[in-house]
Image (cartoon, rainbow, N blue to C red):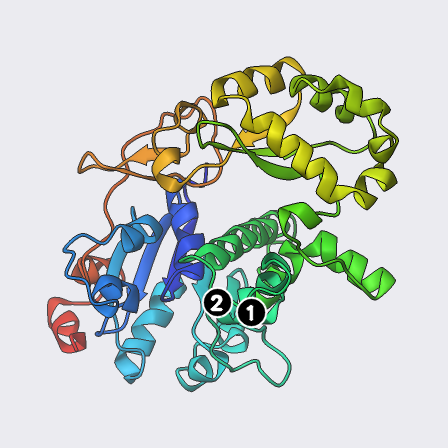
């Protein structure tokens, strides 16, 4: 889909490499530029005290890219990167603005030199404001500061961290969409632009429905335990064989009679405690207890069949271990094969009619440095001189 689009990535960790990784999966040529020390994510398992030789986290976000090493703190390295950017459609970076300015790789400098360039800056907190140069990871900027964590935690719970890269990958999606919007604009105008995404802004959008309520009414209901749920039918129930079911009633009154019938309690519809949404909300604990007993008398297969017969929205509560064995996840294309015969999470879209081929591995540190510099016209002697 993105054949002939060239991306130069000067980025570390997950969010920006993840965005470039999606574009690589979709056919773009992506050249990953690393410092002599390499992207810290290469050492993820070492950092957490593990000695795993494989690194599936790094592979996910960097598969299919070419990799070069340049020291942009040195004049020769910064100049080589500029020569590379001159051949690119997109420059994607999560390096903080002050460091980019010192190397002459800031937006103003590069866009002046290369007017067609789409320059994408992904930061923790944006390019303006008092915290523009503050470091930001997804647990800090997306989860904590944007309010995603506080909204997710049940009322009264202590703060807890987001799982690895979750906020980063949401921001990767936002970044890809923003870049491709700029690509479309350039088709019309012939001119590139600055594209700015941040973990903070993406986090705010991710909780946008609740944030819209906060902005309009000035207050917001907290996330509550099952027996205190604002909408008791949007809840979780356990079957007698220990499986949990996520039940989700759609808007309006359509689903309540179907749910009551599915659990073998059709008379509940006429119970004045549960006759309308307000009544059910006022009697949440009682209704949850009744549904707990009803689901607890059914095994998972029976409950699943009854809910499906009623065309009710529900899903099993699954772990990642369950997901990788879920036949629907395979049918939906949630996983791709890599050239070493393993499975990896797929990019979040499918293009029917395009053959799904095994993905090439992530490059080893500096694997393509000599080849890429030679393509830019550097002689063997000049390439050797640029080695850190």
Name the element at disc 2. helix
Q: How many marks?
A: 2
Q: Residue 298: image x %, image y %? A: 54, 21
Q: Earlier in the sequence, mark 2 or mark 1?
A: 2
State the residue at coordinates (32%, 57%). 31
Q: Is residue 230 above or below residue 266?
A: below
| Residue 89 in view (yes/no) | no
Q: Is residue 345 above or below residue 50?
A: above
Q: Quadrant of the C terminus?
A: bottom left
Tell me if mark 2 has few (under 14), some (14-19) or many (20+) residues whose alpha carbon lies within 10 angstroms of its own: many
Viewer-proximal residue, 251 or 187?
251
Q: Residue 217: image x %, image y %? A: 86, 62
Q: Residue 357: image x %, image y %? A: 30, 30
State the residue at coordinates (17%, 38%). 340
State the residue at coordinates (33%, 70%). 81
Viewer-proximal residue, 153 or 214?
153
Mark 2–mark 1 distance (CA, rounded to whole Å): 6 Å
> Which residue carries the number 2 mark?
139
Q: Residue 9: image x %, image y %? A: 38, 61
Image check: 246 left or right of 388? right
Image check: 44 left or right of 29? left
> Which residue carries the number 1 mark?
144
Viewer-proximal residue, 92 or 218?
218
Name the element at disc 1. helix
State the residue at coordinates (30%, 53%). 57
Q: Is residue 256 above or below residue 226?
A: above
């Amino acid at each position: 889909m993105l054949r002939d689009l060239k991306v130069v990535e000067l980025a570390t960790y997950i969010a920006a490499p993840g965005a470039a990784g999606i574009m690589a999966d979709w056919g773009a040529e992506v050249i990953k530029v690393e410092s002599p020390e390499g992207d810290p994510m290469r050492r993820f398992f070492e950092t957490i005290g593990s000695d795993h030789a494989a690194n599936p986290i790094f592979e996910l976000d960097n598969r299919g890219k070419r990799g070069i090493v340049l020291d942009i703190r040195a004049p020769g390295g910064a100049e080589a990167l500029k020569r590379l950017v001159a051949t690119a459609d997109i420059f994607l970076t999560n390096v903080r603005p002050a460091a980019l300015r010192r190397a002459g790789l800031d937006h103003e400098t590069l866009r002046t030199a290369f007017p067609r360039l789409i320059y994408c800056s992904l930061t923790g907190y944006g390019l303006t404001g008092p915290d523009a140069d503050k470091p930001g990871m997804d647990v800090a900027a997306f989860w904590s500061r944007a309010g995603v964590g506080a909204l997710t935690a049940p009322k009264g719970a202590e703060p807890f961290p987001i799982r690895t890269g979750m906020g980063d990958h949401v921001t990767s999606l936002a970044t890809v969409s923003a870049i491709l919007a700029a690509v479309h604009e350039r088709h019309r105008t012939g001119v590139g632009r600055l594209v700015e995404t941040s973990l903070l802004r993406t986090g705010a959008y991710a909780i946008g429905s609740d944030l819209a309520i906060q902005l309009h009414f000035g207050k917001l209901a907290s996330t509550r335990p099952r027996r205190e749920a604002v909408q008791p039918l949007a809840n979780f129930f356990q079957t007698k064989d220990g499986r949990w079911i996520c039940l989700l009633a759609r808007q309006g009154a359509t689903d309540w009679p179907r749910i009551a019938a599915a659990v073998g309690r059709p008379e509940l519809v006429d119970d004045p405690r549960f006759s309308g949404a307000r009544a059910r909300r006022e009697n949440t604990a009682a209704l949850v207890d009744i549904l707990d007993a009803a689901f607890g008398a059914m095994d998972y297969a029976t409950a699943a069949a009854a809910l499906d017969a009623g065309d009710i929205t529900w899903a099993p509560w699954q772990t990642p271990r369950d997901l990788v064995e879920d036949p629907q996840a395979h049918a939906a294309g949630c996983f791709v094969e890599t050239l070493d015969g393993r499975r990896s999470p797929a990019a979040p879209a499918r293009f029917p009619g395009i053959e799904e081929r095994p993905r090439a591995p992530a490059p080893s540190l500096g694997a393509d440095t000599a080849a890429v510099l030679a393509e830019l016209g550097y002689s063997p002697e000049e390439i050797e001189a640029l080695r850190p």
